[in-house]
Image: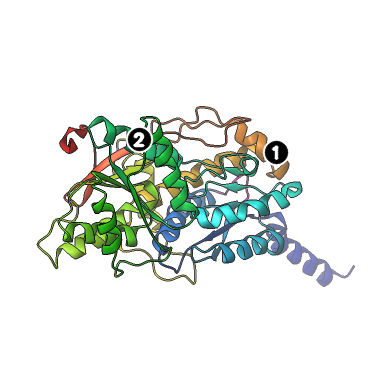
Amino acid sequence: MPAPRLWMCALLLFFCLPVLAQKPEIPIGVSADFRGASKFLGIELYRGSMAYLDAVNDAGGVNGRKIKLFTLNDGYNPGPAITNTIQLVEREKVFLLFDYVGTPTVTRVLPLLKIYKNQNVFLFFPFTGAQPQRDPPYSDFAFNLRTSYRQETAGLVDNFVKIGRKRVAVFYQADAYGRSGWEGVRLALSKYNLEIVAEATYRRGATFSDSLKQQVDHLRSANADAVISIGTYAPCAAFIRDARDAGWDVPIANVSFVGSAFLLNLLAEEEKKSTRNYTANLINTEILPNFDDVSLPAVKEFHELMDRYNPSAPEGFGAATKDEFKYNYVSFEGFLNAKLLVEILKRAGNPPDRAKIRSAVASIHDFDLGIKTPVSFGADKNQGMDAVYFNFVENYRLVPITDWERWRK
């Protein structure tokens, strides 16, 4: 071979070898609301996950493979969630599904996972505490990190009953999410031979500008002495506003899915236009310790990586969240979701093998995420944590409840 041709081959090999040596990415599929009425939930879960994944990718990824999230918007609606899932599995060939948001979307996607069972397609850590993905037949195809709505609502009922507030009403979203929380309240009350005294619903997609006075009047007329809300931040904030405007000051509790930071922001802005205190007697359950408690290793790491990377919303889905919401419960949950996912991918082989995912998850026992609550799975256990944290609002911040007596009837 002539010398010039030898030199050209050598140069091609020199420049091409690094490319050939690169390992493929691990594609992960995400369907969530990034544009609709609950977009901050999808955006913040994504941002928290990306803060951790960016750090992992900068360090070389998982066994040399970087993780790439494919994000699609479903607007918190079942139809698009189904379409997105089919696209992610069949066109994008994602390795697994991750960070889905909401019961109405997740419950409709679960039958698809059963259809894809021979391909070992699994859904990891959806942002919902509903039962369908925790119970057969779909518990075989989904893994949950967060505590269930039944556990959150049971904790609220137990504490309300202890302080004499036994006439519990429920305000909830009229879909699978709301009914899941409603069922949790019903079951918890039945232990005390009590029933829900009244219930009122709102349509999914309701906004803060909507009037919920009719729902307030209905629950108040039943002489309820506590309300448990199963909804998203905008309509739940509207319900609280209308209740307080009507002079009804009973304790109102929300479950973790509400998006507490965004609910409090709406109420704080409303207070600027009024003399009323919209956050008095407001209670929230959370499934994680406080996202500002930097004495916890995971919280400290969360703050550091959110500061370093400051992830934006997924490309094409608008601007990043305001700076005052850089740290919140939703983004912290996304961060821990990603941290645990990376550990599972490491245990699923090199390269990661879908057929090894189930055994990789089952091998997680008393795993330390850095929040003093160990995470455990097993052959018959697809939920990693069971903790419930109770908070009330003080100076527009969530503060742990140490004594429920302040709300004794």
Disc 1 to disc 2, C-alpha distance: 46 Å
Residue 144's place in the image compared with 265, above or below, is: above
Magenta stretch containing residue 61, yes or no?
A: yes
Q: Residue at x 63, y 39 (%)?
A: 136
* Amino acid carrying mark 1 in the image: Lys
Looking at this view, name the residue that lies furthest to the top.
Answer: 366
Name the element at disc 2: loop
Say which of marks 1 and 2 sits in front. Answer: 2
Q: Is residue 97 left or right of residue 407?
A: right
Please give the range of residues in magenta. 60-66
Kindly identify the residue that appears in the image at 36 percent across and 46 percent down. 255
Residue 94 as seen in the image, left or right of residue 211? right
- Describe the element under mark 1 as helix, strand or loop: helix
Residue type at tag 2: Leu
- Can you say which quadrant of the picture contains the N terminus? bottom right
Q: Earlier in the sequence, mark 1 or mark 2?
A: 2
Q: Is residue 368 magenta?
A: no
Residue 353 visible from this viewpoint: no
Magenta stretch, main secondary structure, is loop
Extreme right residue here? 1
Quadrant hosting residue 151:
top left
- The x and y percentages for residue 332 are 39, 47
Q: Quadrant of residue 85?
A: bottom right
Q: Nearer the viewer, residue 330 or 298?
A: 330
Residue at screen point 63% across, 30% down: 379
For image coordinates 26% across by 30% down, the residue present is 162
Image height of 179 relative to 405, above or below: below
Q: Position of residue 91 (x, y in %)?
A: 70, 64
The residue under label 2 is 194
Give the residue at mark 1.
356
How many other residues sit within 10 Å of disc 1, few (<14), some (14-19) or many (≥20)?
some
